[in-house]
Amino acid sequence: MNIICPNCGFSRTINEATLPQRAVMATCPKCSHRFKFREMPVPPRPLPEEPVVRHEEQPAPRPVEPVRPPNPPLQPAEPSRDEDLWNELEALNEEDKSEETAQEEPVTPRLPVWEQATTGYPRAFVQTFLDMVSNPKLFFQAMPVGTGPVKPLLFFLIITQFVAITQAIWQLMGILPPSALTENLGHSVQAALALILYPFEATFFLFLDTAINHLFLRLFKADTKGFEGTFRAEAYSTAPMLLMAVPFIGMPMAMIGMTVYKFLGLRYVHGASAKQVLAVLVLPVLLAVAVAVAMTILAGKI
């Protein structure tokens, strides 16, 4: 018998001879939908036996029986929950266990292509960028530690320098305003300082953000790869910064992308739960807002 779930289409062929006679309901192990997979078999009514008549003997007359109303048709009994067989079928149980085992198989640690390369660095950079963006779960799950933070930092600096060059071009063209530190200088000086100051500024905030997030990871007991693991997750998750090369709309898009990939990076590098990483990312922001509000209130009273 081939049992097919009407909700999700999951099917399994079983030996009907092994099913109890009263079993008619099943629960799909894929979508948990409960359905009737066959009708209750109705046993046939036994026919009265005819007496054996011998030719040399005449049959005795049958006694007249009182007329009884016809029996109502047999209704299939409502099966109990104990007769729900789908989850008890050994074949399906073995399949579910094999799927769980496959999901729990550890990922082999593997350095990103950028860190393995000895030549062809531009191609290795592009391949690492595509690997991280297309499959962040596998990328961060395979991330090892122990090789140092230099290569991840260089990956980050290449991205920030590209953003700095595009920002300088937009400032020279007058499309973007200069930063607060260079607004009183000429366009050429503004562009030159942007190329120098922006990478240093971005690197400072990268280490500061890594230190804060790693502190909260330790508070929530979600730190399994140390500070280097946290730094690697944050450095490679800055890949969406390249969107900042687009004026005006690039900044918000880049911030959203970096937040999403940082969440995935911290979760899969450390093997933490989604709730732990969400608390690690949200609580520092809430504390910073609370401190800013408190300082504003105190400054108003002075």
Image (cartoon, rainbow, N blue to C red):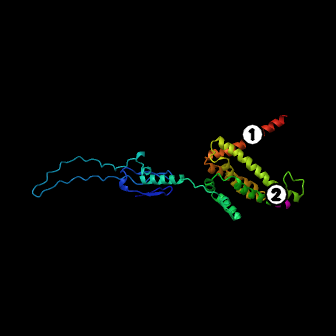
98 sits to left or right of 214:
left
**Main secondary-structure element of the magenta-colored stretch:** helix
Number of residues whose C-alpha sits closer than 10 Å to that of mark 2, classed few (under 14), some (14–19) or many (20 or more): many
Query: Depth-wise, is mark 2 or mark 1 nearer the camera?
Result: 2
Number of residues whose C-alpha sits closer than 10 Å to that of mark 1, classed few (under 14), some (14–19) or many (20 or more): few
Could you tell me which quadrant the N terminus lies in? bottom left
Q: In this orientation, which residue lies closer to the viewer: 251 or 4?
A: 251
Q: In this orientation, which residue lies closer to the viewer: 91 or 146?
A: 146
Q: In this orientation, which residue lies closer to the viewer: 294 or 202?
A: 202
Disc 1 residue type? Ala
Could you tell me which quadrant the C terminus lies in? top right
200 sits to left or right of 21:
right
Can you tell which mark lies on residue 195? 2
Callout 2: SS: helix
Whether residue 121 is visible, yes or no, is yes
Residue range of the region highlighted in magenta in the rendering: 168-173
114 sits to left or right of 13:
right
In the image, what residue occupies the spot 56% across and 53% down? Answer: 106
Q: Position of residue 11 (x, y in %)?
A: 46, 58
Sequence-wise, the earlier of marks 2 and 1 is 2
Q: Is residue 65 magenta?
A: no
In the image, what residue occupies the spot 72% across and 42% down? Answer: 286
Disc 2 residue type? Leu
Callout 1: SS: helix
Whether residue 80 is visible, yes or no, is no
What distance separates the C-alpha of mark 2 from that of mark 1? Answer: 34 Å
Q: Position of residue 57 (x, y in %)?
A: 10, 55
49 sits to left or right of 209:
left
In the image, what residue occupies the spot 67% across and 43% down? Answer: 216
Residue on which the image places disc 1: 290
